[in-house]
Image: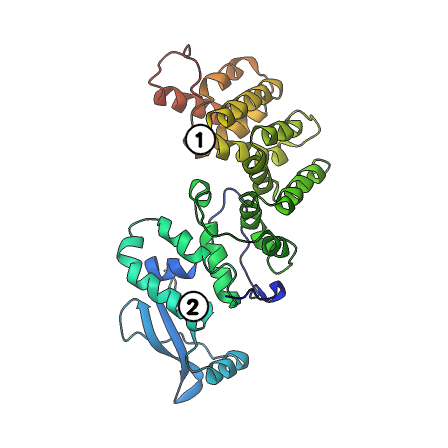
Amino acid sequence: MAAAAVVAFWPSGAGACSFHNYVPTKTAVDWVLTGRAAVLVRPDPENAFSYMVTEVLRGNSGMDAPPFLIDSATRTRLLQNRKDAVLFGLSENGSWIRIAYVKDDYRRALDAVVAKAPDWGKKDYHPERMQRFSNYLQHSDPELRKLALLEIDRAPYALLRQIKTDVPAAYLLELLRSREAYAYRPIVALLLGLNRSVEAQSVISDFIDRSADWAWAEHLGPFATALIEQEGVNGIARLESFLTDPGQPLTKLESVVEAMAIHHGVGTPSIREAVFNVLTSFARNRPGGSVLIARQFSQRQNWAFGASLEPLLETSGNLSSGSKLVVAAYVAQSRVNRGQTQPDNPPVQ
């Protein structure tokens, strides 16, 4: 499959995706597995400006087609390519949503999803989805490339690290610099972190260095995650300079804490120890940081910092009542998970 020019990569209107605390974009695979309905349509032979259902991928047979007029560009394209179709999904509120223009390979990918639906539909994200769709990352069809990246973006980081597809660094760097792919920079950055090339390492390292001087660094989280992936304990040491800089706003530092939380969950014992030491020191020297730690680690049900954060509830007068509530909830849950009723046990690392 030949890679096409990146400028043609993304259809307009791609939904934005942030690194943390976001609802993932619903992909074509999600529509086929769990949507209210998913259909393929073409122009109606009796009215070329209206759609006709040609195949039901999910839902009841015989359902009406989406009640939209076909725009001229799509109609011309469909009439010139008799095997092509348009994928629509029916939302829970009864609205039809155009998902993608479907060519041959995209159609075959959807057929595979339908065949896998009995197994894939049992999980929020079946591991096979990532590996199957990663094979389309460099496909010539921009719609299929978009679907591939959206599908990989759905994968938990622990699963993403197992990706077997060798995506060239040059291709990822081209995506990173593409305006059309800007909304997908987080997953591209994470994929760069898994790429061991000199070029990928240089781009990630340069971003971290430059972002130190920015009041707000969009996408710092995925780049910080990628840095730790590539440099390990040394990467954590480099990120510590953000946490020890009193001029760095906490809103920016939460992305760094999140990257460390991710690697504390999937890393080696030396990685976990380095993260624990750096973040414990961060909370001790800047009590407001304890809220970031509590929030990011509780989201991952990781209770390693409960004992180290607990003293801050009594000694820090700089925490607001709301912040104390967040930290107190984390500490309480960490004690439950350690089977602890007294705060005298050492932290679990």
As drawn, the label of residue 298 is: 1
**In the depicted structure, whether residue 83 falls above or below residue 227:** below
Using the rendered view, name the quadrant where residue 109 is placed: bottom left
Q: What element carries label 1?
A: helix
Farthest-out residue, right: 213
**In the depicted structure, whether residue 155 falls above or below residue 149:** above
Determine the CA span between mark 1 and mark 2. 39 Å
Residue placed most toward the observer, 73 or 332: 73
The percent coordinates of residue 78 (x first, y second) are 47, 81
N-terminal label among 1 and 2: 2
Q: Residue at x 33, y 57 (%)?
A: 34
Residues tagged 1 and 2 counted as in contact (Cβ below 8 A): no
As drawn, the label of residue 106 is: 2
Q: How crowded is mark 2: few (under 14 residues within 10 Å), some or many (20 or more)?
A: many
Q: Residue at x 64, y 44 (%)?
A: 198
Q: Can residue 346 be seen in this view?
A: yes
At label 2, which amino acid type do we have? Tyr
**In the depicted structure, whether residue 79 falls above or below residue 137:** below
The percent coordinates of residue 300 (x first, y second) are 43, 34
Q: How crowded is mark 1: few (under 14 residues within 10 Å), some or many (20 or more)?
A: many
Q: Left of 36 or right of it: where is 178?
A: right
At label 1, which amino acid type do we have? Ser
Residue placed most toward the observer, 161 or 153: 161
The percent coordinates of residue 153 (x first, y second) are 48, 50
